[in-house]
Amino acid sequence: MRSPYSLQRKHGVKRIRQTAQDREAKRQREQSRIKDYLALTNVILTGKKNKDWSEDAFNLTTRILQLNPEFYTAWNYRRNIFAWINFASSHQGILKILSEDLSMTMTALKAHPKVYWIWNHRRWCLENIPDLSESDPNDNTWKKEAWDRELFVVEKMLDSDPRNFHAWDYRRYILANMPIPRPPASELAYTSRKIESNFSNFSAWHQRSKVLSSLWESGDLDESKSKEKDRNIWCAEFELIRNAMYTDPNDQSVWMYHRWLVGSSKSCLLVIAHHLIASVRECHCCLSSNNFNVFNIGCMESIVCYKRMLIKDHATDVDLAMLTRECNGMLQQLQELDPLRRRRYEDLVGTLLK
Amino acid sequence: MCANPTQLLIPLHVSYIQKLGDSKDDLAYHLSAHLRLNAIYWGYTALAIMNHPDALDREQMIDFVMSCWDQEAGAFGAHPDHDAHLLSTLSAIQILTAQDAVDKVDVDCVVKFILSLHQPSGVFAGDQFGEIDTRFLYCAVSALSLLGRLHELDKDGKREKTVEYILRCRNYDGGFGSCVGAESHAAQVFVCVAALAILDRMDCVDVDTLAFWLCERQLPNGGLNGRPEKLEDVCYSFWVLSSLSILGKVHWIDVDKLVAFILSAQDTENGGIADRPGDMVDVFHTLFGVAGLSILGYPGLVDLDPIYCMPAKLIEAKGLRKSWEALPRREA
Amino acid sequence: MESSFDTIILGTGLTESIVAAALSKAGYKVAHLDTNSFYGGNEASLSFEELIQWADANSSSIDSPFSFITYSTRVLPQPRQYSICLRPSIIPSMGPLISSLISSGVSKYSGFRLLDCVSVYHPSGLVKNVPASKEDVFKSNEITLIGKRRLMRFLTFAAGDFEIQKEIQGKHDKPFLEFLKTEFSLSDDIAGVIAYALAYCVSEADPTHPALRRLHKYLHSIGRYGPSAFLVGHYGGIGDIAQGFCRAAAVHGATYILGRKIESITQSEPGNTPNSRYTVCLVDFPEPLKCNLLISSPSYVPPELANDAFHLPSSVFNQSSVDVIARCTVIIDKSISLGSRSKDDPSVSDEVAARTGVDTGVLVVPPSSVAGGSSTSAAIVFITGEGSMSAPSGKWILYIALPVPSSSVSPESILKPYLDAVLALTTDPADVPAQPLFAMFYLETSSGTRSERGARRTEASYLVPPCLNYVSLPDLPDTATVHAEATFREALKVVGRSDDELRLNVEFWPPVEEAEDSEVI
């Protein structure tokens, strides 16, 4: 029986001390593999030079790409051979080759989830799916299914590494190009799930900001009554991020997202500023009264940021002297609390004084 | 093995880089053939920054670069008989520029190759197969600039389009992603900011926001990560520092802690620098560790131009120097 | 057959099996015997038929820790498709057992699944999810914002280097529940959930320090293999794992003899003949077995050698004050809902997900939350179904364990209210409680701490690993492993080769022979 949860995990490649003997043993072991690999490389590069577009050549690229999925020239060669086969083949034949390539790249991705060339080849496959099936010109089922499957595949990849930016980029690409687009709400729900399963997954917070931005498009939420729904969503987001803030104010994702949310409705900053600062401050105070993390850097940094925004954008509506004084005080404290970035706080104090 | 080196072990790293070509008994060497030209650029530049520019044989290097010429495409692959690609083409141009051997190349041909990859959206594809990424955009802009042919972008509004694309990749955190919609990532921040610097469009950058995001990359152990809530890695020493240096804000991070972190990732026995302490070294992290140290004013190193990631003197001599600030070189 | 061994190990309980594997892998000649016809001793996983045989045999045994065994029926369809564990357990994803499974290579003989959920029973009859991680806290809509901050503050404390924090100084022995309320301002509800369902405290008197040590380990186990801190072994869990270690021992040359009664164990002064200190004779077995070192589970120690046997002390932190446990094992054919969320299907709303059953989960019942139940001790319900390969499709095994004050209680009457409460959680839309297809009740009695008994020689040649007394549900496997390593080290003092100067530094598990990278060239 095989364990579905393999207990062995891959770690970063640790440096190991090798004795001369170890090295010699490894050399001996690798000699024949190197010889075979170089021979195979040679056959392929020669075939490519000689414009060998045969099925045999195609199969050789499969072999070498299984050994080394980063050999981009072999991927290129493979695509060139495909183009030749394409001329001669029926739609069904093309679909067959493409679906084989999709499953081949899937296997490769499981082993090498961060190799650009594999992701790239997958895109190429998808884009080369013929539009219509020969038997029924209206039948785009295969194409639709292929793109739907991509979404499933990319979710699997994001399950195993929720920060893999290749996978997130690919996901956005799929969503943008699917023959039948999915409603943005379902993508919003997806980001909720990803965040709930890994709070520090800033990639998911980022995706959420992109989805909401495209929902709101104009970026200004309080212009007209028709924007009321958007504004409700916006308020719900504030509740969500407030919840996150209390859960872990030390997580950068929280403050980054908070800042985006504030920035997404610049014109109402003044209206909400006090509410906002109060809410951030409440979280901050709750931390202090518990005598835990007495001062939270993220909280203070955000308060300073919003106050600086008020000073800059709403100079005529606010008590400049007071805000400046308050910012100054907090920046002094931050210099003590966050010595890594002390010089930045010093610079900010300098700009306040100007 | 001494646990925590407090010095940059230059002689060890020099010999590590010199010996890289001798690892033909390692399968891994052959499996990375698709990065060979890049590796030579990384190794050579690291040597130049460590003030050993002659540690690799000049003629051999030039010969190898020229052997990577892909006649059909009119540009460079990463290895003889590999296909041309912008990534390897930039490395080739960088090496040849550093060796003052650009005259060996059919520059018109290379320029044509680069321009052919410009997309209507403004971004560049990496090769004829169309993968797009702001990395390729940087490769194109940097290579054109090094070849003295940046003005070629002025035709048909290519320059504006290129800038527009970069700006479309900008996120609310001030950072940039690999393509429109992508999450900010320190390496993509470097390629976008450096490209804007070469294109003289730094006015488009929100310095305050971006520099804040960049200095937030420093973790309590001194190392830098590439995105929020990720692990530190030596290579971000360069991506983050070069960007900060272009923004004039290198001092926003804790220099001593970062220096100590980079030094702790050295292999004190066989040379080279790893992604983080205790891991396997490679030439990529060796360059970016050394490059980071140079920007930080580490004593005994040569100034690095953070925009081109080449020796600063060379870039100045070519009249390509843009505005950037590294920390003053400290006395040993 | 060869009859001379470096060591003979009696009993195939989890501890002994790990010792057998470690000694065999270290190159010693081991004979491993069990009078039962199955592996695993008191930790065995049995088919239904074996369970009935075990129950019948144990009713007449005085040596066994199990007593008052009653069961409802001896007939059940598909009896072989069950793997029923006598002492069910879950495994923290970080800890001695997992480390040993990996470094010994035994993990490849066993399958695992992640525990679906840990829930807590509320007096209202509702089941609530247990917030164990940042993500759980974040998505909970039952905890107030301030409550979240406080809970997170505590979880961060417990996951961190809590030993040096000021909150714990001088409060090691303070009751954990009280500690949570006074030091971290946690509400009664949340403090109860933490103490019983996160730290697996038995009663409100459980002291703070050991509870924090356990909790620390569990918190670090989260995320290693998935959102749960715990794994569940296939085929009955630790019984199958014990067998896996035996298999590893056999692969390294250990001899296995099961199902033979021991006729005699005799001792002689070591002479010139190697491995001749002990002679073990088995009923119906031609040749006596000889060895220099005897290792046996406590129940195997013959009275005449009682003074010769050295009982290793049990590890301090795993000592438990619980003497008697009432247990029941019930088989049902309706799924139980533990309010867990369906992770795989995003389209399922929480409400619908709550109606779908759990395959493998834990339900903690704090004191005083079930009418008629204990007001002092928490009960642990463990449900496992097809997903852990322990029951046929559509059937679930439900285990309940409750510490009880003395061995004079009837396990059936004391566990009945718990069983009824759990059966009422059926996912049946008509709310008809599940009817057990089979129910077995028994008591498990801890042996006293025997570390004082027996000879303590500089080189004890008869080792008795510490008794595997009751510990919290996830701690049994790690306790056994810690005991096994201590026994292994003690054993080396006797059998360690004289040419091996560093014999006491021998690794518990030698490095696994590295397989060549799978290449297809």
Image (spheres, rainbow, N blue to C red):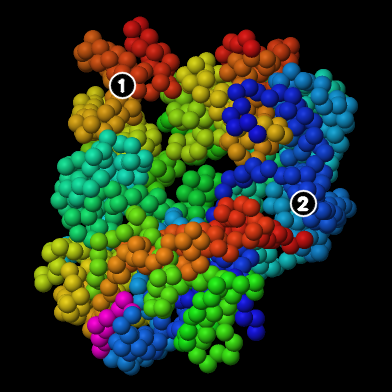
Image-based side of C384 in relation to B160, left or right: left
Q: Secondary structure at mark 2?
A: helix
Estimate the spatial distance between the alpha carbons at disc 1 and disc 2, rounded to whole Å. 58 Å
Magenta residues (range): C64-72
Question: Same subunit under labels 1 and 2?
Answer: yes
Q: Please name the amino acid that badge 1 sits on.
A: Val
Residue A26, numbered circle:
2
Residue B62: where, in percent of width, then height?
85, 28
Q: Earlier in the sequence, mark 1 or mark 2?
A: 2
Report if residue C294 is visible in the image. Answer: yes
Q: Nearer the viewer, residue B247 or B220?
A: B220
Name which residue lies at 52% across and 35% down: B232
Nearer the camera: disc 1 or disc 2: 2
Q: In this rendering, is residue A216 above or below A334?
A: below
Q: Count residues near mark 1 (Cα–Cα under 10 Å), then give few for <14, some for 14-19, many for 20+.
A: many
Residue on which disc 1 sits: A304
Residue C176: where, in percent of width, then height?
22, 50
| Quadrant of the frame with the C terminus of chain C | bottom right
Write down the chain letter for disc 1: A
| Quadrant of the frame with the N terminus of chain C | bottom right
